[in-house]
Image (spheres, helix red, strand yellow):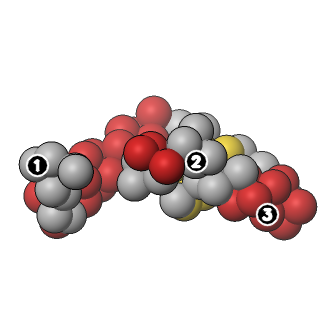
Amino acid sequence: MKNDREQTIVHVSAFTTTEKEKDIFRRYKMHVSCVMSKPLEFEPFFNLIRGIKGFWFTTTRIPKSIK
């Protein structure tokens, strides 16, 4: 996906349950924007999703169109 020039602005987030440095590094080599530890319990996971939603839909500025 990141090899396509028009899609390089797409941010990709990766959830993982691993703490292994090599696995996290591999995801960044795949051009993900961030790697997040995925909580195994429902409430912490829900809180993480709520935080991500707040970040992307409230905090960030995303252009309406790209030319």
Q: Foreground: 43 or 31? A: 31
- Badge 2 marks a residue whose secondary structure is loop
Q: Earlier in the sequence, mark 1 or mark 2?
A: 2
| Residue extending furthest toward the front | 67
Which residue sits at x=52%, y=59%? 33
Estimate the spatial distance between the alpha carbons at disc 3 and disc 1, rounded to whole Å: 32 Å
Answer with left or right where residue 16 lies relative to residue 47.
Answer: right
Residue depth check, mark 3 versus mark 2: number of the one nearer the observer = 2
Find residue 67 and report its horizontal and vertical position in percent: 22, 51
Estimate the spatial distance between the alpha carbons at disc 1 and disc 2, rounded to whole Å: 20 Å
Answer with left or right where residue 58 lies relative to residue 47.
Answer: left
Residue depth check, mark 3 versus mark 1: number of the one nearer the observer = 1
- Badge 3 marks a residue whose secondary structure is helix
Q: Foreground: 13 or 16? A: 13
Estimate the spatial distance between the alpha carbons at disc 3 and disc 2, rounded to whole Å: 16 Å
Q: Earlier in the sequence, mark 3 or mark 2?
A: 2
Pick the quarter of the image with the N terminus: top right
Q: Earlier in the sequence, mark 3 or mark 1?
A: 3
Amino acid type, label 1? Lys
Q: Which residue is mark 3?
A: 25
Q: Which residue is mark 2?
A: 2
Which residue sits at x=54%, y=60%? 34
Q: Which residue is mark 1?
A: 64
Q: Which mark is residue 11?
A: none
Crowd class of label 1 (few under 14; some 14 to 19; many from 20; radius 10 Å): few
Let me know if residue 44 appears in the view.
no
- Badge 1 marks a residue whose secondary structure is loop
